[in-house]
Every structure is written in C-alpha cells, then in structure tokens.
Image (cartoon, helix red, strand yellow):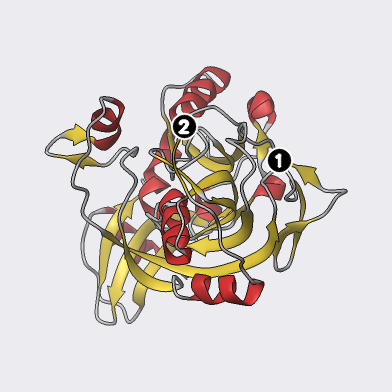
Amino acid sequence: MPVIAVDKPLNLTSHDVVGRARRALATKRVGHTGTLDPLATGVLVLCVNDSTKVVQFMDADSKDYLAWISLGAGTRTLDAEGPVDDTADVPPLTENGVRAILADFVGPLAQVPPQYSAIQVGGVRAYAVARAGGTLDLPARNVVIHSLELLGMYESVQAAPHAFSPTPQGWTPDAEGKTFPFPAPLGQFPTLLVRARVGSGTYLRSLARDVGAALGVPAHLSGLVRTRVGRYDLSAAANLEHLAQANRIPDLDALDFPRLEADERLARELRQGKRPQHTAQGRQVVTLNGELVAVVDGDGAELRVVRAWA
C-alpha cells in the first residue's frame, strides 16, 4: 500500500492522524514525513506498509505554508495555544518595511527551536520540560527559508483572509475558495499574512517570534496551513474521514529524484548491495522495466546503494 497525502484537521496531533490511519487501513505500519502541530492544518504525507521505506527520502522535501503572524502579543508556545504572557504596542508599519524585514530571513539561517517542541536534549523532550514550567538551552539549528511573501497586513487575525484557492504562485486569498479552520484567537492583534516556502526542520512558530523581534514587538503564530510537501499539494490531499478511499501514490512516484533505467545485471548487483561502475552523479531512482529497484548515490564512477527494493 503506497503513499497518501491527507489534510490534517485542526486540534489533532500528527500521531493522532497516524493512529486513525492505522485503524482505517487495518495496518500498524504507518509513518509520516513531517510533523504538523495540533493547531496547524494541511498536508501530512503518510507512508503505509512497505512505503515506510520512502520516508527517509521525503523528510528533506521543501514545504509551503500560509502563516498568520499576530504582532504585539507573545506566548510561551509561540502559537495560539497561549496564554499571552507578553504584550507591547505595535508601532506603525508599512508593507515595504515589513517586506524588507522578511527578506532578511530568506536564505540559510540559524534558528532557535520553540521550547514547546519534540527536540531532545540529554534524552529529555523540550516540551516535557516546558510543560513543567522549565526551559532547556536549545541550540540554534541550521535551516533554509526559500521565500517569504507578504500577502497582506490586517488589524487582527479575525479580519485576515481565511479562504484560499491554489494558483501557479501558490495558495492565494479567494473568498470563493477553500475555508481553513483556525484556533481560537487570543485577542485583537495586528496580523501579517505570509506565504512561506521553507526547507526541512524550519519552525514557523520560531519564525513568527523572530519576525516580531525584528519589528521590536512580541509575536505569535495565530494560524498555520501547510499547503504543499514536496510534490503533494493540498488541493489533492484526502479528507481523513475518507482515508480508505483516498488516492494512493505508488512509491516510485513518491520519490522526487532523477530516474535511471537499469538492465538485469545492474539491478541484480544493486539488490546485492554491490557498487557497480556507472557515470551517473547525484541521487537517483533506479528502475527495471518501470519497477523500483533502488535509490542510489552516484559519484560519476560508481553507484552506492542507499536503499534497495527486492
């Protein structure tokens, strides 16, 4: 059973979605390719049964988000779970000024993860310490932000657009489009609507905190929708309640790498774990008669097997 992209509902953890998928699909072997917080919705990619082998190749996929960043109010969780524990008046802002601030975050950067995260330090989860009232010294992690587009500035998250449609540029406000559910707002705070494309491991909650700090005010993420993971767009994601009837993507189509068609000899050697000579360079998906054989790394001289399929 192959890969399924689902639209994660509000207030469910990614683990909750996996549990429901296990029951709906009658299997214990279900994994996902990137956690979504309970207060976030959107694309969560599930890999079922033997397709769990492809998870390692999808974790690094870039991801698109719609993020609502509310200014002048900070929370320990960095999102709308709250409560608000820090407030400040928001100075007058211009769209050009905000765009200049956002531009400073585009590219490689070191980002400090949220205290309320699953990161482990010394075998202890950060969120467990945070829920007990403590904090951990979380080192900054290297992440990449590919783009940040300001779609609008609003007097509150309630006044910001909540309905969107897919376009070639990404999901865009559209009163006739898909309406996204939101967590209960923590108050009336000026809100930025940002369309983001980020690399693996980027926390949008941390981005909200850091954008606020750059503007001189506390901030929190008041809404988040993941609209794309790799090649999987929200427009094609399945409703969790109809998972058993969802469109299923074959493993081969789930792997977003160049394809290399093998002959019988090459396929046999790769499945035996050998390093056959080949001029291919970079990561490749190797097929035989259209069937998945292996994922390999080539250096221009030989192929090294990363994962093989029988």
In the picture as drawn, the residue positioned furthest to the right comes out as: 176
Decide which of 259, 159 is in the foreground and name it: 159
Q: Is residue 249 left or right of residue 87?
A: right
Decide which of 78, 110 is in the foreground and name it: 78
Say what amino acid the circle numbered 1 marks. Answer: Phe
Decide which of 233, 84 is in the foreground and name it: 84
Please determine whether, in this image, residue 239 is positioned above or below residue 190. Answer: above
Q: Residue at x 44, y 62 (%)?
A: 216
In this figure, which residue is indicated by the disc labeled 2?
83
Q: Secondary structure at mark 2?
A: loop
Tell me where residue 84 appears, x and y as whole percent: 47, 36
Checking the image for residue 39, the label placed there is none
Tell me where residue 303 appears, x and y as whole percent: 27, 70
Say what amino acid the circle numbered 2 marks. Answer: Pro
Mark 1 is surrounded, within 10 Å at the Cα level, by few (under 14), some (14 to 19) or many (20 or more) other residues, namely: some
First of labels 1, 2 by sequence position = 2
Tell me where residue 4 appears, x and y as whole percent: 57, 39
Quadrant, the C terminus: top left
Q: Is residue 210 left or right of residue 157?
A: left
> What number of labels is visible?
2
Mark 2 is surrounded, within 10 Å at the Cα level, by few (under 14), some (14 to 19) or many (20 or more) other residues, namely: some
Tell me where residue 135 appears, x and y as whole percent: 22, 38
In this figure, which residue is indicated by the disc labeled 1?
180
Q: Secondary structure at mark 1?
A: loop
- Residue 160 in view: yes
Q: Is residue 56 left or right of residue 138?
A: right
Please determine whether, in this image, residue 204 is positioned above or below residue 134. Answer: below
| Viewer-nearest of discs 1 and 2 | 2
Please determine whether, in this image, residue 258 is positioned above or below residue 113. Answer: below
User: How far, Cα to Cα, is label 1 from label 2?
Assistant: 22 Å
Q: Quadrant of residue 105?
A: bottom left
